[in-house]
Amino acid sequence: MKRTYLNLFTVAALAGAASMLPSCSDKEGCTDSSAVNFDSEADTDNGSCLYDAAVKSGSLTADETWTNDRIYFLEGKVVVPDGVTLTIEAGTIIKGKEGQETLASALVVARGGKLIAVGTADMPIIFTSELDNIALGEKVGTNLTRTDNEKWGGVAILGRAPISAEFGDTEANLEGIPVGDGFGQYGGSNAADNSGTLAYVSIRHGGVSIGEGNELNALTLGGVGSGTSISNIEIYATLDDGIECFGGTVSISKALVYFQGDDGIDLDQNYSGTISEFAVIHGDGIGTDEGLEIDGPEGTTNTTGMFTLTNGICKSVGTTEGSAGDFKSKAQGTVSNVTFDYSSIAGGKKVKFRASYNADCTNKSDAFSYLFTTPAKLVFNACNYVGVSVYENADPAVCVAENAANQLLAAALLDGTGVGGSVNISTLFASWTAAGVRGEL
């Protein structure tokens, strides 16, 4: 029998090669004992640790950071109180639990609190319902659609910037939150108030009732100041308004409101910030109302502020519901380069202007008359729409002839064949929003 022998050189070479191979005991895995997939036999952590869900309720008592390695659940109102900062990491998923009225889930940032929620296009921060089967690392789930709303509440941010409330009040309390709770107040005198930063945040499937005839908006901003930064926001499938601003001076850029049940963007109490590069898309018989619903001051204080809406589009998809825009209650500001595209509806949808009349049908101060003040308090520049409609602040209308005459006046003044908006919905929203990822834009 032939035998093979290894000389000393060969043995040494093999021994050296073996020493370069990983040992059987050098195992990679999750070495954090607090993780649900902790591996007691792992020697080296490979970043695979996963953590259980965290349920949040009530008021935070100190600064917190919510991390993207677990899913957070909101149970009832979760409040960020005065002096506390909540930081949410990019890629974090937050799910609101079901519940109506006093049991409705919502994140409320009270006056003096701060929310730092900065996502990215690759890792957006997602607020959604507990019914949504979206998992860690995903941008969308598979079981809820663009018509699934009223599954939880929404996000409300309250600040100390000026508002114009009824009876000359400079402060107010958010509807649906009892005054005695202490965290629903908003308004003040600090126009530059800072409530934090939101970027690449998607809010989905919300708008649950918090009181009779009162639903939470997806994103409510009450008296939020210009020191706050809000950009790259998606509202997807909400029961009530997409974004509603009660006064305040905060500016919002790159906002998509997709399939809202009420108004896309609703401005109240003399909001005086700027909303730019925005899109409101109606659809599918969910009770949608206005693309834009714009009101001015409610009271006698803080009446000089002017809103700006620039480079936007309001359009309908697969529905005859909804109107282009309703400018009423002393709406004052500038609308520039906005397209109201309702070409999918026969005859389109007109932009509406409310008129208030004296007993003799002479026009009083309201949105319509603000088109003709010197200087004009309500200005349209380079917008594109199919026509205008002037209507009366009364039911039923009394000054019918005056409404018809004023409609001709407004049509002559406001040329709706301008260039409109140049906002590129696909470029801004396709890669990270629910509507974009699902190919619905």
Image (cartoon, rainbow, N blue to C red):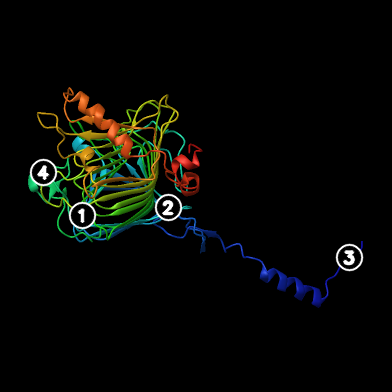
Q: Residue at x 25, y 42 (%)?
A: 371
Label 3: which residue? 3
**What amino acid type is highlighted by mark number 3?**
Arg
The earlier-in-sequence mark between 1 and 2 is: 2
Q: Find the distance from the CA under tag 1 to the CA under tag 3.
A: 88 Å
Q: Residue at x 49, y 55 (%)?
A: 48
**What amino acid type is highlighted by mark number 1?**
Gly
Picture disc at residue 166 = 4
Q: Camera-side residue: 279 or 379?
A: 379
Q: Find the distance from the CA under tag 2 to the CA under tag 3.
A: 63 Å
The earlier-in-sequence mark between 3 and 4 is: 3
Give the x, y percent position of residue 60: 22, 54
Picture disc at residue 159 = 1
The earlier-in-sequence mark between 2 and 3 is: 3
Nearer to us: label 4 or label 2: 4
Q: Secondary structure at mark 2?
A: loop
Label 2: which residue? 91
On the question of residue 291 being in view, the answer is no
Which image quadrant for residue 412? Answer: top left
**What amino acid type is highlighted by mark number 2?**
Gly
317 sits to left or right of 5: left
Q: Secondary structure at mark 4?
A: helix
The earlier-in-sequence mark between 4 and 1 is: 1
Q: Find the distance from the CA under tag 4 to the CA under tag 1.
A: 18 Å
**What amino acid type is highlighted by mark number 4?**
Glu
Q: Camera-side residue: 438 or 405?
A: 405
Give the x, y percent position of residue 391: 23, 29
Residue at the far right in the pictured view: 1
Give the x, y percent position of residue 428: 46, 49
The earlier-in-sequence mark between 1 and 3 is: 3
Q: Secondary structure at mark 1?
A: loop
How many other residues sit within 10 Å of disc 3, few (<14), some (14-19) or many (≥20)? few
